[in-house]
Image (spheres, rainbow, N blue to C red):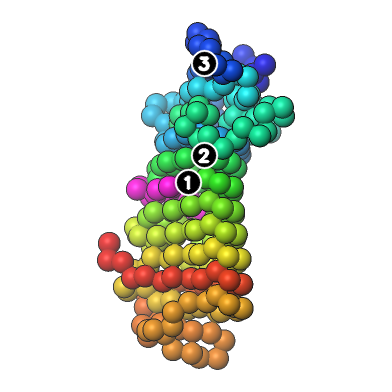
Amino acid sequence: MTRLGLAAFVASLAGVVPVGAQTWRTIDASRQVRDTNAVSVHVDYAAGRLDLKPATGSVLYHASVRYDAERTEPVARFDSATHVLSLGVHLRRMHLSNTDDQHGAGSMHAELSGRVPMDLSLELGAVEADLQLGGLRLTDLSLRGGAADVTARFDQPNREQLRTMTLQVGAAQVKLLDVANSRVSHINAEVGAGALTIDLGGVLSRDVDITATLAMGGLTLNVSPDDGVFVDERSFLGGFEKDGFVKKGDGWYSTNYDAASRRVRVHLHAFMGGLTLTRVQK
């Protein structure tokens, strides 16, 4: 059975379409903005296609989910007492072995309000995701990807100060674009065997500290030619290319670091993984 919250949600079930052992259903759920209190949003999506973007109008959220009722269970629930919104699709226990088919695992299209502050966390399994995060009011962001292929964009400025961005990348491919527009001050990144790209395009209005722990995977960091970069490197077999850097005491400094008006500080812990630093003119 689905968990669709209480009377504040608007939900409807479309027709059932059996395909072999699959039983496809669709739900639509939404809630209007009742106040401007901060909301914690948890998106837990096991497998399939996920699209997320800012909402238009006065809805707190709107979600449309196509799912296989034989294998998965959709979630769309808002707790008005704690201001916690839960969205996603969970795998039923008996079907855990059938999680590797993204294209046959359904889809979720979600919209979130840009009117209320949000702490957003996403836990993604075998998911292909396109996340349009610009224009929201994010205060904290957490993204955990297992075997996911994720592109997250900040095409517009974040409307709050983003305190911390936490990224955990297993065997996933994760790209974050125009991250300077997020107004983030601290990024924590852990990469297992996957690949993470952080593109600091956009308007970098403050210094950014990045703590990166790389096992076997890689981190690509795109910065502006004008940004000063400092790298505190502690590596075993990994590391980064040091052309354009000068060693001074506690780490490596780009030649323009002292004169730069904006700085990016990287605290790198690399085992076999490596950091690739590129200068990109935006």
Left/right of residue 187 with respect to residue 256 in the rendered view = right
Q: Report which residue position mark 1 lands on.
A: 149
- Circle 2 sits in a helix, a strand or a loop, which is it? strand
- Which residue lies most toward the top here? 15
**Which of disc 1 and disc 3 is earlier in sequence?**
3
Q: Is residue 267 above or below residue 41?
A: below
**Which of disc 1 and disc 2 is earlier in sequence?**
2
Q: Are marks 2 and 3 in contact (CB under 8 Å)?
A: no
Q: What span is in magenta? A: 150-162
Q: Is residue 195 rendered magenta in the image?
A: no
Left/right of residue 277 with respect to residue 148 in the rendered view = left
- Name the residue at 52% across, 45% down: 148
Between 67 and 101, the one nearer to me in the picture: 101
Q: Are marks 3 and 1 in contact (CB under 8 Å)?
A: no
Between 24 and 63, the one nearer to me in the picture: 24
Which residue type does callout 2 highlight? Val
The N terminus: image quadrant: top right
Q: Report which residue position mark 3 lands on.
A: 19
Which residue type does callout 3 highlight? Val
| Residue 127: mark | 2
The prevailing secondary structure element of the residues shown in magenta is loop
- Name the residue at 40% across, 48% down: 153
Which residue type does callout 1 highlight? Asp
Quadrant for residue 269, please give it: bottom right
Disc 2 packing (10 Å; few <14; some 14–19; many ≥20): many
- Name the residue at 60% across, 35% down: 99
Percent of width and height locating residue 192: 60, 59
- Circle 3 sits in a helix, a strand or a loop, which is it? strand
- Circle 1 sits in a helix, a strand or a loop, which is it? strand
Disc 1 packing (10 Å; few <14; some 14–19; many ≥20): many
